[in-house]
Amino acid sequence: MTRYYDQVDMGDELASVEKEVSDQMVLDFCDVWSSGGGASRFTDHEIAKKEGLPGAIVPGIMSMNYMAQFLAGWADGGQLKKLDVVFRQPVQHPQTISFVGVITDKNQVAGENQVECDVYIQNAYGDRLVGGKATVVLPGRK
Amino acid sequence: MYVDMHCHSVSSDDSRATVEQYLKWIQVLRKRGQQVDAIVLTEHRKFDAEHDYSALSSQYGVVVLKGSELDTRYGHFLVYGANQRLQRSFDFTDTKLDSVALMQEAKECGAIAIPAHPGRFGIGFCEYVDKGPDFSDVGIVELLNGGSRRGENERAEELVGKKSFLGTGGSDAHFVSAIGTCLTEFPQNIRNEQELVEALLAKEFRAVRLEETNHH
Amino acid sequence: MTTQELEFDRSQLGVEYDAGSFPVKAESIIKCCRALGESNPIYLDEKAARAAGHPGLVAPPAFCGIFVRGFGRPDIKLKAGGGGMHAGEVIENHVPVYAGDVLSAKTSLKDVYAKTGRTGTMVFVVWETSFTNQRGQKVADVQESFMRRA
């Protein structure tokens, strides 16, 4: 259902979403992203460990795409205008991660209904592994 | 008075929040019955002299003060009351500043430098307190840091208990909604950086979490 | 260490390079979205995308970032240890991307600076890239930060 600008307010939380990230999903993503770039810290647990990581990790650009997906899914009928992400801690896989967000500002700029959000990717302990700030444009009522 | 003693605006490389966004968010917190009266912008490796936030400060009813968070050989240090003399004495962009010299010079300038997030793994003051130089100038550390990972604030708490330090609280916010999550409660009213230094030296403050300020 | 002391080829700051052109293939969009567990049909089925009013299969909103890996970037001769972790990314979308688009990219070195953190001294390298489609429309701006341990 379309989400309209007048339905949201500062301080509102975005309904959180959980996602189970499997080794296979990362492998498939890397297949597109690095076009068969071979085994890496993203796809091979042993290589990751040799690089000092606890195990294979989700590529930053995949986390970025997950966050974009979370926001686009929330902003039904709207668009993701800007997403600015800081990769704070490696996101290991396989792992169930959750996406949380909150609206921090609302502004009408040059005819656009802009909504600012803080978004995070959390692990099961609530550690915020990835943090981001997004600008989403929502439709107004006709 | 509740003061967020540690936050970063877009003037720091890794922050995504503007000062106005922080102040707008504090209005959301106030509607929830929570109290944030002042914030101290402690930008990374710099003192932000160029921006004037006085208009925003009166518009939103939040005192906006300026400090710095500097990278030293023994972890990050929060500096309050940094003046031109202190800025001339040290290159704030240096990532290997001499912590002891910084504390001493700050003291002589009427400023104060304290270890930030001392429990932070790998870089916090806890890693150095017993093996570095003479840290007898340290009497206050940041006890509650909103950017801490699991176990890090606990390490700071242990340090404060063991050494009988005083502890401040700050959110270490880099994103809007993190502002005010940790605070320092002062009995005094603080209007400027000099009064903040005096209030710290008066030693009558405590670190609190945002939830503790709730009036509802 | 100060940022001024960092050794790298400063003459490359702000110099724009042609990073090549990138065809947006429907199969790549679909494969990428499946890997992300996407269920919205506008990213998975061209017919559904058209039925929803789009001119073709829609690329997801951070898709441009995927192409950046293929860039042969110039050596900035940075003298700082190894590692090389992706530290941050910004994507600003201007117009939507559809399967069949051909994007051209221009990239430049934006910033290099030093700081300290849980893992010691780190050097950050920031690149800026702008994507334009075959109609000459500015599609997206992407900024990436990479971190190396000094």
Image: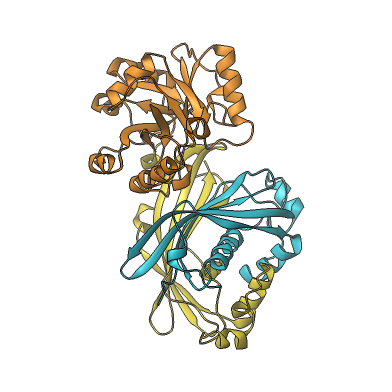
Chain colours: A cyan, B orange, C yellow
User: For the image shown, how many numbered marks are present on the structure?
Assistant: 0
Q: Is residue C22 above or below residue B133?
A: below
Please tell me which residue lies in front, B118 or A27. B118
Q: Position of residue C2 (x, y in %)?
A: 39, 37
- Displayed quadrant of residue C1: top left
Q: Above or below — where is C6 with respect to A24?
A: above
- Would residue A76 be visible to someone looking at this image? yes
Say whether residue A134 is left or right of residue B190: right
Task: From this view, report whether residue C135 is shown above or below residue C95.
Answer: below
Q: C74 and A52: which one is in front?
A: A52
Relative placement, left or right, of C69 versus A30 is left
- Residue at 36 percent across and 69 percent down: it is A112
Residue A108 position in % (x across, y down):
34, 64
Residue at (54%, 67%) from the top-left corner? A72
Query: Residue A61: horizontal and vertical position, in percent?
Result: 57, 61
**Residue at the front extreme, as displayed:** B216
Quarter containing the N terminus of chain B: top left
Q: Nearer the viewer, residue C14 or A125?
A: A125
Q: Where C47 sits versus A52, above or below?
A: below
Taking C44 as reference, is C11 left or right? left
Res. B11 in view: no
The percent coordinates of residue B203 (x first, y second) are: 41, 14
